[in-house]
Every structure is written in structure tokens, then in C-alpha cells.
Image (cartoon, rainbow, N blue to C red):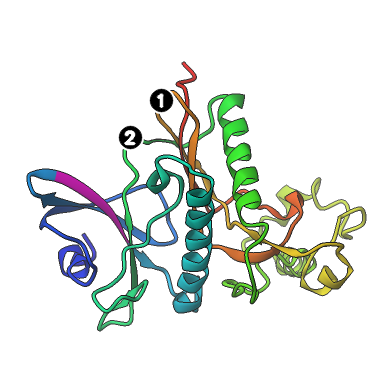
Amino acid sequence: MRHNVQAMTAQFQILGEFKEAVPYGTGHINDTYMAVFNQGGTKARYILQRINHHVFKNPPALMENVLRVTSHIREKLIQQGANDISRRVLTVIPNREGGCFYQDAEGNYWRAYIFIENAKTYDVLETPKQAYEAAKAFGKFQGLLVDLPGPALHDTIPNFHNGPLRFQTFIKALEEDVCNRAAAAQRGDADRTPGGWVEVGPHRREHVVGPVRVGERLRREDDVRRCSAAEHDVAIRHDADPRVGLAAEIERRHVEVRDRVVADS
């Protein structure tokens, strides 16, 4: 492994004896590990993750967002009398000083979560039912956060959802064609204007009716997770950021959904 995971887990309030850690998942942004502890003879698993501070350039702000969102959702679920809350919302493990992340001597930022058990990852959605459950999960997520109090969340990746800027960047890359691939894309290059696009970006937010919602940097379709159970139960792993509340703003990448559903087979 690239990192001394055992040493990093010691920086968080995790009880028991460290047994092992292995790389976890198929993500390519952050470095994610599943750590196993012996707690009184019972195996307990945790997620330990090194935040990629080259992508998320302000990890403290990122974790402030995550803590605000997860705390708000947990309180709402408690008020609703929900069951199995630790499966429905992420549990951030505090560091030894009570903070929500740890910065090591090399400048890396780490965070830890309770591992949500009995979940299976699909690299590609296999059924419409899975897509439906994922979409429903995000609908519930938005509903739980509709009354999230201010101030606004931090913008964790500036201009990530700035459609016009992304289009300008695309045109620039197309014209420079440093990899000599533009000829193969001529059919898609027929119209170089963003006509007909719905431009919803930072410069248009003042024209949007309604509040800016909490959005999700969706991770990947391969992180839609489900297991056999008698009820639907969803927790969304997120790096929350402020976003205009339109479905068109939700991008396909960067999401992890953990859920319990009846097996589709």
C-alpha cells in the first residue's frame, strides 16, 4: 500500500486493535482504504480516505461541508423516528482532538467513516430498478436538506458546474488539438456554439427562482450499492457543494450511493 494506514487510523477515535487494511473501491480521485479492527472479539470495519488535495484544494472547507450536511441529515432522521440511521447517513469519525479530519506531516488530509456493511458495488447499472433507486435516493437527499440553514456551503471545486466556461475550455482544446484527435470528432464538432443549451452557472444564479440547493458531486455509476433486505434504505457518500437546484446540474461522475433494496434478481 502507498500509505501507512495503521498509523493514520491511530489519529482517529477508533476503538479496538488494528488488524489489517486494504485498498477499497474503484475510485481514482482519493485514496480509499478499508480498515479492520478487533473490538471485543467482534470485527469492525471503517473507511479511511486520503483526500486528493490537488483536486479538492481546500480540504478543511470540504469537510466542513460534509459535517454540516451529515449532521443536518442525522438530526432530521432522528426527528422522523427513522431506523438504522447509521446506514442512512455517513458517520464521520472525529480525530483525536475532535476535528473531522487529520493532516499528516506530509501535508495529506485524511478522513474516516463508519463502514456501511452488506453492500455490493456495481461498476455498471444493470437494471432500470437500480437507476430508479439511485434517483430516489437523491430525491430523498434533497428533501432532507431543503431546510439546511445558512451560511452557504463552500464551493469545493470552483467552476466545476460552470457550463459556459467548460464549453469555452472545450473549444480551446478542440482548436489546439494537441493530440491530433479533432478530425475523428468532426461529426460532433458541427456546431461550435452552445445554442439551445440551458446555461445554469455561477453567472446566472441571480436569475434562478428559488434558493441554491445542496448538490452532489456524483461519484460513479459503479458505486451504486445494494444488498438484499426487506426495505429500501439509503445513505449517500458525498462531497457536498452549493449548487443551483436543477436536475440538469447533476453530473454523472463522483457519487457513492449505499442502499438496501430487495434483490433485483
Instruction: Pinpoint residue 177: horizontal percent, then vertical percent.
Output: 69, 64
Left or right: 64 as drawn, with respect to 116: right
For disc 1, the marked residue is 229
The amino acid pointed to by label 2 is: Asn
User: Of 191 and 215, which appears nearest the observer?
Assistant: 215
Instruction: Pinpoint residue 216: horizontal percent, then vertical percent.
Output: 60, 56
Q: Main secondary structure of the magenta part?
A: strand
Instruction: Pinpoint residue 165: horizontal percent, then vertical percent.
Output: 76, 70
The amino acid pointed to by label 1 is: Ala
Pick the quarter of the image with the N terminus. Answer: bottom left
Bounds of the magenta span?
43-48
Identify the residue shown where x is 23% and y is 67%: 13
Identify the residue shown where x is 67% and y is 55%: 181
- Neighbour class for label 2 at 10 Å: few (<14), some, many (≥20)? few
Residue furthest right as drawn: 195
User: Of 98 and 4, which appears nearest the observer?
Assistant: 98
Query: Mark 1–mark 2 contact, CB under 8 Å?
Result: yes
At numbered mark 1, what does the secondary structure look like: helix, strand or loop?
loop
For disc 2, the marked residue is 118
User: Of 193 and 112, which appears nearest the observer?
Assistant: 112
Above/below status of 253 relative to 72: above
Mark 1–mark 2 Cα distance, whole angstroms, equals 10 Å
